[in-house]
Amino acid sequence: MKKTWLAVLALPVIAYPATSWYLGKQVQSNLDQQYAQLDANPFIKVVQRTYERGVFSANESVTIEVFGDMMRSMAGDMPEGVEAPEPLQLTFNSAISHGPFVAGLSAAVIDSELVIPETAQEEARKLFGDAKPLTAHTVVKFNGSGSSAVKSPALSAPLLAVDGGEPGHMAWEGLDVNIDFAADMSHYTMNGTAPKLEILDGKGVHMVMTGMTLAADQTRVFEDDPFLFAGTQNFTVGTVSISGPELEGEPVSLKDVSYDISAPLKDDFLDLGARISAQVVQVGDFNFGPAHYDFSLEHLHARTVSELYKRMMEMYSDPSMFMGKGDPAMAMSAMAGPAMALLQHDPVLKLDRLSFNTPSGEALVQARASLPGLQPEEAGNPMIMIGKLQASGSLALPEQMMREMMLNRTQSQLAMMDPEATLTDEQVAMVNAQLDAQLQQFESQGYIDRADGLIKARFAFKQGQLTVNDKPFNPGR
């Protein structure tokens, strides 16, 4: 009986090291798989990696090279006496603790940091003090999912003088990013903040960005494609201000800047959309905001997009393409097949909105284009594709903005002949008269509508015929 109890008591003592060793093996396998996914990326390569695993802990060191092939290609083309740039290599060391109770009920905890080479440590200390330039604290759960907190500290650094100016200065208030990920990184969410970036160059140009945030919610579309994700991404900036003598007394200020990307997956198709906006675009005394630039590519066949992306990565993996030594036609021909296949699934290209405010009203342009019903044998035939092209859109432009554009163009043409010349009152009147005559002609023909200081028109292209405001239009006449 006593031996039985001893055996029962000994079970946890034996099981804990065995479990820890097994979990350590699983963590290493997961990391192996994540690094293997980088093989398809021509810009980032793992050039060295060591992994020492014990029963309860492990140590990893990995060196990643960024743009290595491109840098080496440039080396042979540098002018005599000019030293070629070295490929950027980043080394990360990780201390890994694994076991069933390392952080609650988790499989492992990984603490990683960017390692500064000895030759650069003195300069790094000037920037970061005793803080580590980049760290990550990762907790891995039993199923391979987990979370990671990535941090970069604040820094303050001088900038080299350029073109005879004074030395500048840069201040960065740090970065915090939190990532939750599924096993194999098949899904992840990300949220990050960066409070402030300030740059002052030696010529008096001053730029400040505040309130930066980033967020993402992404799901991998195909198991065999590590880079194609569906979901959302968002980057925002609270304020951007730029001032300096080169702006001729008209400082620029942006507020509530947002860059949103959405790529929802429905059945076998992706809808890719991007929206860029700023609520305030202050230039001098006038606000051009709200300003929007929204475009989208709808009904993209996901598997074909994946194939097109793989071909593009293969093209960029050839270093000669970076230096313009390769044959662009041959490189592009490898992408032609999936590109034509993509057109056969009836994608739609849309300029959802291009708009900004002006002193005389809002300028707005919208458009869309598609090639419905394109057959495999028709893809690549320009005449057939033009015949199938369907496009439409509308625009509303402030008339005063068009006048100013015409006057600026005339002033530029005059300055080419005489840099000191300016438009006379008679020349301004002549330009306005010419524009009025053109607008009146188009209005009388029904091609434009003029009301409330705006010029409006609708346009369409179908079956090889261009129409403006539903009237046939020949731009060559």
Image (cartoon, rainbow, N blue to C red):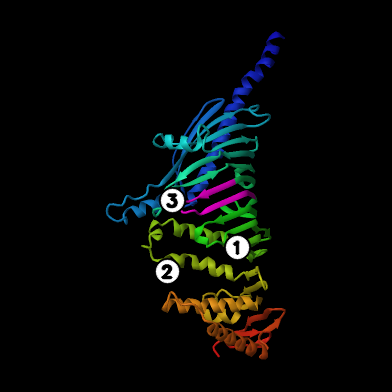
Looking at the image, residue 252 lies above or below residue 344? above
Counting residues from the start of the chain, the first of labels 1 and 2 encountered is: 1
Q: At 56% across and 80% down in the image, what residue appears?
A: 386
User: In the rendering, which numbered label is found on residue 284?
Assistant: 1
Q: Residue at x 69, y 78 (%)?
A: 453
Crowd rating for badge 1 (residues with CA inside 10 Å; few <14, some 14–19, many 20+)? some
- Residue 302's label in the rendered image is none
The answer to whether the residue labelled 1 contacts the one labelled 2, judged by CB atoms less than 8 Å apart, is no
Label 2 is placed on what type of residue?
Ala
Question: Viewer-proximal residue, 378 or 88?
Answer: 88
**Residue 258 image offset from top left, x and y in percent:** 64, 56
Question: Which span is picked out in magenta?
Answer: 196-215
Percent from the top left, x then y, of residue 51? 48, 33
Q: Which dot marks residue 329?
A: 2
Pair 2/3: label in front: 3
Which residue is found at the position 63% from the left and 45% from the top?
192
- What secondary structure prevails in the magenta region? strand
Q: Secondary structure at mark 2?
A: helix
Q: In this rendering, which labeled residue sits more in front, label 1 or label 2?
A: 1
Nearest to the observer: residue 436 or residue 17: 436
Mark 3 lies on residue: 67
Locate the N terminus by quadrant: top right
* Crowd rating for badge 2 (residues with CA inside 10 Å; few <14, some 14–19, many 20+): few
The secondary structure type at the circle numbered 3 is: loop
Say what amino acid the circle numbered 1 marks.
Gly
Identify the amino acid type marked 3.
Phe
Residue name at image x 67 percent, y 73 percent = 360
Q: Quadrant of the C terminus?
A: bottom right
First along the sequence among labels 3 and 1: 3
